[in-house]
Amino acid sequence: MTVVDVVRILRRNLALLIICTVIGGLIGAAYQLTRPEVFTAKATGMVVAGDSASVGGAMSGNTIAQQRATTYTKLVETRTMAQKTAEILKKQGMSEAASGQLTASAPSDTAFIEIKATGGTAKNAQALANAGLEALISEALRMETYGQTAGSGNKSDAQLAKMTSVHVLGYESAGLPTGDRGKSLALFLAAGLVIGFLIGAVIAVVRKQFDVRVRDQATVEELTGSGTLAVVPDDKKLAEQRERSIVHISGVTGEAFRQLRTNLRFANVDNPPRSVVITSANPGEGKSTVSTHLAVVMAQAGEKVVLIDADMRRPVQHKAFGTEAGVGLSQVLAGDVSLDDALMRTETKRLQMLAAGRIPPNPSELLGSQRMKDLLAELRRRGYFVVIDAPPLLAVTDAGLLGTIADGTIYVAVVGKTHRDQVSLVAKRLEQVGAPLLGSVLARVPRKKMGDVLYGYGASTYGYGSYHGDYGKYGYYSSYGTEEQDSQESIAVVKDDRQPKERLVRAQKTERVDTDSEITPRRAK
């Protein structure tokens, strides 16, 4: 993972980073504001040594004093010093101050000793620092004069000071300190913000590593071994087309489908496809939307197009054309109806539709039959570009069977929904049956994330009943065909209110193309 990949991951999880950063800052500030306030007082002592009457004596004494200062700082942490400090505080009536913390340090190249004391109140910290300095002076004096006082009896501190050339003097007593709450608030706030951001970044990267869904174009291309033919942005109008019957092939969405048309023509330069199967891994991923819009834009470009609804288990294309699925592909393959009688002309020039027909008990056998091959061969002979709306590939074998007799397959995946293992399985199954994969279409890409998808770094259901039902059960794809899922498939259609019955009109009235068809199919009713 490169630095650029990390940056893209962080940008993709910007909301998470902001939330974690804000929470971290709030926690840091809250901790500082609610914790007990600490007061720190400082008293300063100075070590004096040697004879200052001569230059040599003064220099030698200064060196000794600096060495002693370092040694004396260690005394402050001893039990003896703690006891002496507590005794001094007890005499002063400040015994509660002894519970604070006492530390000492000697600034480099100096003979000074700084004694710092912390306490819950300013007075306690001040008393502890001064008592610590007093105890250190007494203890240092005792150590320096220990040899000289042996056998000499009790002597006063003044007399003892004269007997030694090294002793500690009080240089500055501790003043009344202020609390650290206000001083440290900004520090704790900044620390909380930084820690929160880092936690958010770690979560984002870890989530990326364990993310099982497709998030970008590069992932799909890597898993399928083929290119991306188009990236279709998420468009609310597409989801509303079933109810409102609106053709929406303009703007950014329309340009995406026109890009699909262009890329499809160059998918195989030596042998451009004339029949394509459009499928997905799961239901509700927009394969029918892509099928319809591809058929429309191909017709607008001057191609004679036939759109075949081969999803016999859950046909949807007939709803877009305002007709019933009663007469269509299943009857043609069964020999009950001729192709000419089953084809329906639409109001989009050069576009005709072959509905699924009555739902048969054996759709896989029909779609894999010789008659299906003959049907595609006949449409090719007549010069049609054929778009086949096939069932989801992971649910049933229909799409794989169709892929072997068509010129190629287009796979539709949904960013943020389709799982990576499902993409890999789709590519594997197509390879196993020998169906060429022309490329993929990424659908429902949020417009704000188009850049991440283009330059990026649950179980679905399908089937009917149980294993003993008419159509069997396809693993965890067990509820394919419900109305809730059906409403997710977007169909590009317009109804003409000027006619007594619902009929298709052209997606763009300004575009004029001829309809030189070798057959005269019936119109959608």
Image (cartoon, rainbow, N blue to C red):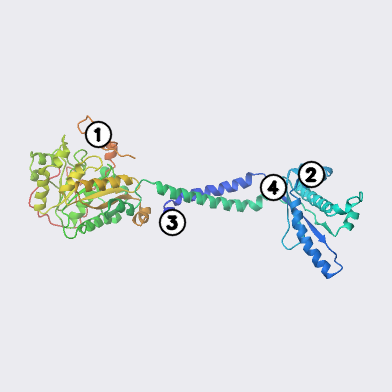
Quarter of the picture holding the C terminus: top left
Which is nearer the eye, 52 or 415?
52
| Disc 3 residue type (three-letter) | Val
Residue at point 69%, 47% (across, down): 38
Position above or below: 468 against 308? above
| Labelled pair 3, 2 in contact (Cβ < 8 Å) | no
Crowdedness near tag 1: few (<14), some (14–19) or many (≥20) residues, C-alpha within 10 Å: many
* Distance (Cα) linking label 1 and label 4: 70 Å
- Give the image location of residue 156, x and y in percent: 91, 51
Residue placed under numbered mark 3 in the picture: 7
Where residue 38 is drawn, which disc sits there?
4
- Mark 4 vs mark 2, foreground winner is 2
Where residue 473 is drawn, which disc sits there?
1
- Mark 3 vs mark 2, foreground winner is 2
Residue placed under numbered mark 2 in the picture: 83
Mark 1 or mark 4: which comes first in sequence? 4
